Image (tube, grey):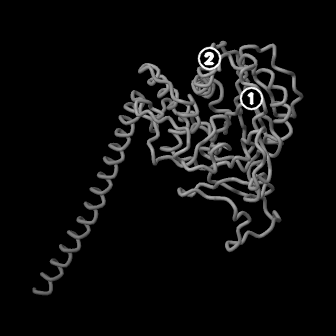
Amino acid sequence: MNLFNGKILAVTLMTLLTLGIFYSYILRHYRFVVAFKHKDKTSADSSAASDSTTAANCVKESPAINIRSHEFSLVVPDHLKYNQPHLTENSRTDVMTVTPWLAPVVWEGTFNQDVLDSIYKPKNISIAATVFAVGKYTMFLKNFLESAEQHFFVGFRVHMHVFTDQPNEVPKVKMAAGRQVMVHKVPSLNRWQEISARRMKQIQDLIEEKLRGNTDYIFCLDVDSKFHGRWGTESLGRLVTVVHPGYYRDDRSRFPYERRPQSRAYVAPGEGDFYYCGGAYGGLLQEVHQLTKTCNLNFEADAKDGIEAAWQEESHLNRYMWINKPSKVLSPEYLWQDFKPKNPEIRLLRFSGVIKNYADIRPNV
């Protein structure tokens, strides 16, 4: 009898244990689902709140810009031969090659272009570039477009989007297969500062109305510049920016950030990483969309308060990049200045602003 009762007790305990495990699993699953739904709701509420704010931090977009992501599938062809990398050797010891947040800084000698091209060419990526030629700035288009054909993502699908108030002045440049120039009419403006500031809104609109679904990466470039060397797959990344050639050796106290706290472009003393160019930035389509949308909202909010940031879009860009760290930083090789002699660390000049007289080409100085 005792043996029989013992068996009943054992069976009862096993049943209770099984029910307990099953109940624990169901409860945990229920909590996960509730938490996940709550997170989604919180994200949605946060997104709605962000769209109505003018804070310089990340602004959530709606609707989303969905594209294919090429960032995490770096596949090379089988049996590709190249020099072995060594962890104990560094091809560049004269410059910074990685930021404190572990983003690569791209210089000549820090990458293997054959490896990178072999990774990205099979993906059949599409790259857009925007350039603004308003007023007398149309005089720079020919050199810009012709040199881009020689150096900018050669062998890839590229669409050059030219924004101009004079479509008839856009030169006819012979383009390779899969590459073309697309012209967008924009109004003339009386102040070069407003031309600069309004570019963010026009790039945002271009992404939303023309590029979603058919473009992977976008770069926003200054027309009064010329390509001198390769600009290719080494520059691809989630969010990419170029260090300004005029300030890359300076202490950040000398950077021309917007210093008025009333502006949404404000960067406080003692803050900031580098001073970035307004004339060259890019990345994945959805990342640049978020950047331009945020900067435009902040510019418009400043304008309502009667404030214009010191360097218009460049000031807002620098504020954005201080908060939203770029995933790749391009060295000053990617936007030098023709009037400057090359410093020793500049081994290859890739893209450079041409010499010009601003009094002759800007509507106001």
Residue drawn at (37%, 31%), measured in percent from left and top? 49
Task: Give the percent coordinates (x, y) of residue 321.
Answer: 53, 42
Q: Quadrant of residue 165?
A: top right
Mark sitting on residue 223:
1
Quarter of the image with the N terminus is bottom left
Mark sitting on residue 191:
2
Quarter of the image with the C terminus is top right
Q: Quadrant of residue 193?
A: top right
Question: Which amino acid type is marked by label 1?
Answer: Val
Residue drawn at (58%, 25%), measured in percent from left and top? 197
The disc, 1 or 2, on the residue closer to the chain's N-terminal end is: 2
Q: Quadrant of residue 9?
A: bottom left
Q: 296 or 357, which lies in front? A: 357
Q: Is residue 113 left or right of residue 4?
A: right
Outermost left residue: 1
88 to 63, vertically: above or below? below
Mark 2 Cα shell of 10 Å, populated few (<14), some (14-19), many (≥20): few
Mark 1 Cα shell of 10 Å, populated few (<14), some (14-19), many (≥20): many
Residue drawn at (45%, 24%), measured in percent from left and top? 302
Task: Give the percent coordinates (x, y) of residue 358.
Answer: 72, 24
Question: Which amino acid type is marked by label 2?
Answer: Arg
Q: Is residue 57 left or right of residue 45?
A: right
Q: Secondary structure at mark 2?
A: loop
Q: Secondary structure at mark 1?
A: loop
Mark sitting on residue 48:
none
Q: 258 or 183, which lies in front? A: 258
Q: CA distance from mark 1 to mark 2?
A: 17 Å
Residue drawn at (48%, 30%), measured in percent from left and top? 62
Task: Give the percent coordinates (x, y) of residue 202.
Answer: 61, 23
